[in-house]
Amino acid sequence: MKKNWAIRKDAEAVSPVIATILMVAITVVLAAVLYVMVLGFGTTTNNTPAATYQKDTISNGKLISIVSITNKEVPWDDVSIQVTNSTGTAVYEPVKLGLDATPGATQTPTGAGSMTVKPVCVVTDLAGNGVVSGGDTISLTVAGGLSGSYTVNFLYEPTGERIGTPVTWT
């Protein structure tokens, strides 16, 4: 069998300067890719915390106790309380400033929304540190008591997602 390829004597290779520039460029690109992979560049840092709740019946309403909250410290400023029933929705926004004075500090945030009769919402910060933590409570009351089905969502404002599962009762 005869070989069909021939060696060309006039072919030129890439110049040493161009070869060096290409090697440096490839090295820089690979280093950048490795940097992004190692440091997790592009991942979100505003992870929504997880929480568990307990609900109890109180005079004229319901008491929701935060059993635990995980992932990070969440100031009350970053939480909205969304209450929904068959007549509409009310959203309450506690302010950390009113909850970081003394242990057991309470605040009655005002609610905005389409709900016909808005429950009175009272937030109690057990530690008085302005941060959502286990033992903090939220009471929802209406003169004459809450009737019908209600759903309460705690929303983490930086991400717009729910903190834990909704609290419901009928």
Image: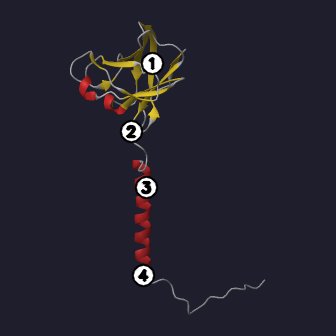
Tell me whether the residue at label 2 lies in contact with that at label 3, contact meaning CB atoms closer than 8 angstroms: no
Which of the two discs, 1 and 3, labels the residue nearer the N terminus?
Answer: 3
Discs 4/3, front: 3
Helix, strand or loop at disc 4?
Answer: helix
Instruction: State the image quarter where residue 56 is shown.
Output: top left
Which of the two discs, 4 and 2, labels the residue nearer the N terminus?
Answer: 4
Q: Residue at x 31, y 21 (%)?
A: 108
Tell me whether the residue at label 2 lies in contact with that at label 1, contact meaning CB atoms closer than 8 angstroms: no
Specify the label residue 16 is tagged with.
4
Q: Which residue is tagged 3?
A: 34
Discs 2/3, front: 2
Specify the label residue 158 is tagged with.
2
Discs 4/2, front: 2
Q: Residue at x 43, y 55 (%)?
A: 34
100 horizontally vs 42: left or right: left
Amino acid found under the numbered disc labelled 1: Tyr
Helix, strand or loop at disc 1?
Answer: strand
Badge 4 local density, few (<14 within 10 Å), some, or many (20+)? few
Kindly report the distance in space between the C-alpha atoms of the residues bearing marks 4 and 3: 27 Å
Discs 4/1, front: 1
Helix, strand or loop at disc 3?
Answer: helix
